[in-house]
Image (cartoon, rainbow, N blue to C red):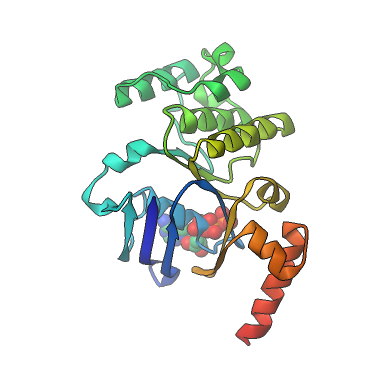
């Protein structure tokens, strides 16, 4: 579905992605983990065409994304912080997005779960952080995309809203969708991930299935497995 070959990106003298290559062949949930500033958002923004890499290639269904922007129709993106026109109402925002796509909403599951229709008259600038996240989540899933890219999706969501999002992610996964999620919440990643991609200082430390990670470390929980594997890597690196 998505192949990444030798991706490099620097901001000034800061090398943020250093020769990143990986392949997301089929569906499933891939959690992109790593410390702050390790390059997770830069990595997903590169796939979205929002960051232009200095070198390397990204292929979407076999086609280089530099040659096309049509591929973006197949990706639903939930940003870390959504930026929307301040004075627009929620209802107007949804209508605008549908007008731009020239398509009606296909998937209204989250719209309903979050009861956003009852808030259509609310103006974007007046929304709480969590409600803004709910709007972003509903938009990401709205057109039934093949791929979902979610940047720290549950940050700021209340527990019930986060649970609804998790259920939705699992439902889409069961349909064979590819879901890339950046997160710092290991318990959540543990519940929903098929694979873990660990970024460290702009490089992939590993990309493994969750089962493999647990088997290799002999741990049942992702947080303990990560602690173990990272300390082992650390020793090996020295
Ligand atoms: N547009 C930009 N201009 C300059 N530096 C940038 C830009 N975007 C990102 N960076 C820098 O690149 C590094 C990686 O940022 P990025 O947002 O990709 O990290 P992250 O792993 O997503 O972090 P976090 O876990 O804190 O969200 C950081 O040092 C950041 O300051």
How many numbered marks have been drawn onto this rendered protein structure?
Answer: 0
Q: Is residue 221 left or right of residue 50?
A: right
Q: In which quarter of the image is residue 117?
A: top right
Can you give x and y, in whole percent of width and height, for residue 10 in the image? Answer: 39, 67
Q: Which residue is drawn at 49% across and 46% down?
A: 27
Q: Quadrant of the C terminus?
A: bottom right
Foreground pick, 156 / 65 = 65
Can you give x and y, in whole percent of width and height, for residue 156 in the image? Answer: 65, 38
Q: Quadrant of residue 53?
A: bottom left
Q: In this view, does 72 lie to the left or right of 88?
A: left
Q: Residue at x 58, y 33 (%)?
A: 171
In the rendered image, is residue 127 in sight? yes
Q: Which residue is drawn at 41% across and 28% down?
A: 143
Q: Which residue is drawn at 66% across and 64% down?
A: 213
Q: Residue furthest bottom?
A: 238
Against 22, residue 112 (above or below) is: above
Q: Quadrant of residue 76?
A: top left
Can you give x and y, in whole percent of width and height, for residue 233 in the image? Answer: 64, 78
């Amino acid at each position: 579905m998505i192949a990444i070959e030798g991706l490099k990106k620097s901001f000034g003298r800061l090398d943020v992605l250093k020769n990143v290559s990986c392949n997301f062949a089929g569906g499933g949930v891939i959690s992109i983990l790593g410390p702050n500033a390790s390059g997770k958002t830069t990595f997903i923004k590169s796939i979205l065409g929002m960051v232009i890499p200095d070198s390397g290639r990204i292929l979407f269904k076999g086609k280089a994304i530099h040659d096309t922007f049509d591929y973006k129709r197949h990706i639903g993106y939930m940003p870390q912080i959504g930026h929307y026109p301040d004075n627009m109402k929620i209802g107007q925002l949804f209508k605008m997005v549908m007008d731009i796509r020239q398509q009606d909403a296909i998937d209204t599951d989250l719209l309903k779960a979050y009861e956003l229709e009852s808030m259509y008259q609310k103006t974007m600038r007046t929304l709480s952080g969590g409600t803004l996240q709910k709007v972003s989540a509903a938009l990401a899933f709205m057109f039934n995309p093949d791929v979902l890219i979610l940047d720290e999706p549950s940050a700021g969501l209340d527990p019930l809203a986060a649970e609804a999002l998790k259920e939705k992610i699992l439902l889409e996964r069961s349909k064979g969708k590819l879901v890339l999620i950046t997160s710092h919440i290991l318990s959540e990643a543990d519940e929903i991930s098929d694979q873990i991609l660990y970024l460290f200082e702009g490089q992939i430390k590993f990309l493994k299935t969750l089962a493999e990670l647990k088997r290799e470390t002999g741990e049942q929980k992702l947080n303990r497995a990560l602690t173990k594997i990272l300390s082992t890597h650390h020793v090996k690196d020295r």
